[in-house]
Image: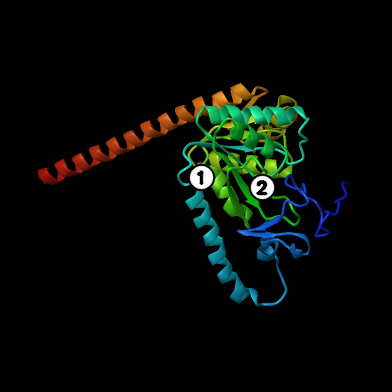
Amino acid sequence: MTRATTSPTGHGPERGDDGVPEKGKGYRKGPVLLRGKEIPAQTTDQRLLAGGGESDWVHSDPWRVMRIQSEFVEGFGALAEVGPAVSVFGSARTPADHPDHALAVEVGRLLAEAGYAVMTGGGPGIMAAANEGAHHAGGTSIGLGIELPFEQGMNEFVNLGVNFRYFFARKTMFVKYAQGFIVLPGGFGTFDELFEALTLVQTHKVTEFPIVLVGSDYWGGLLDWLRTAVADRGMIGRADLDLLHLTDSPEEAVRYVIERGRALAASEREALDELVEDQRDAADDAGEAADAS
């Protein structure tokens, strides 16, 4: 069993893919920056989801809706004009001398050179690497930060940053403003973003977009499990496996996102045109029937 370790701030264990404290960076609570003894013991998400206790939640929770609304307004306002973008995910724990870090830098650079903004969680590791590649290529390097129970801060390569209190508001931005996902090796946070994207696409809750996994040695076992244990039991359809594209090449990852994204967009436009034509034909038939009567 893995034992949780205490964060340097003394405010709870390190957990999840984002669990890398960076002392001195500052603790973000929405637009507010906190350091040292001012860092709270609980995150906003913890307080929102806490059960039991006094009944004052009846009065306080409705007001939280206003804060949640403000996060969506701020996010929509900041990102509405960024243009085409790709979300890049991966571990906050990846050191700068690891090969995955170099892969992420190259992914960020190639995306920026292709005219795409690069969106990450704004933290260290793979996120900072992708932001670094985009930044040095002169592109838009976006960081969507999150309030965590220890200091992390926004990495230095972000040139457009938005900090969130609530994970669900942040996740909406990753999906809403991205034309695709590129996922490098990561932990629970990366898995969470990956499977949320897959679920949204599989259930047609969003228009399909390309999802690329980079690193066959890391993701190969997961895909084998999906093909056998999961698909063999009928938990997913065989066609669902086609929603994921695996590669070891940053060039192929970026090329696939661009080309697959264009193909999906063309199919969507064609389907919309057909729907409009069907509606027009139905209206004409209804008009002719009315005239005949």
Q: Is residue 100 above or below residue 70?
A: above
Q: How many marks?
A: 2
Residue 193 picture quarter: top right
Provide the residue designation for mark 1: 176
Q: Determine whether the residue tagged by mark 2 lies in a helix, strand or loop.
A: loop
Given the image, on which type of amino acid does mark 1 rest?
Answer: Lys
Q: Determine whether the residue tagged by mark 1 lies in a helix, strand or loop.
A: helix
Relative depth, front residue between 137 and 204: 137
Q: Classify 10 Å Cα crowding around label 1: few (below 14), some (14-19), many (20 and above).
A: few
Nearer to us: label 2 or label 1: 2
Q: Is residue 191 above or below residue 34?
A: above
Provide the residue designation for mark 2: 154
Residue 223 picture quarter: top right
Q: Classify 10 Å Cα crowding around label 2: few (below 14), some (14-19), many (20 and above).
A: many
Q: Residue at x 72, y 46 (%)?
A: 18
**Residue 219 at least partly seen:** no
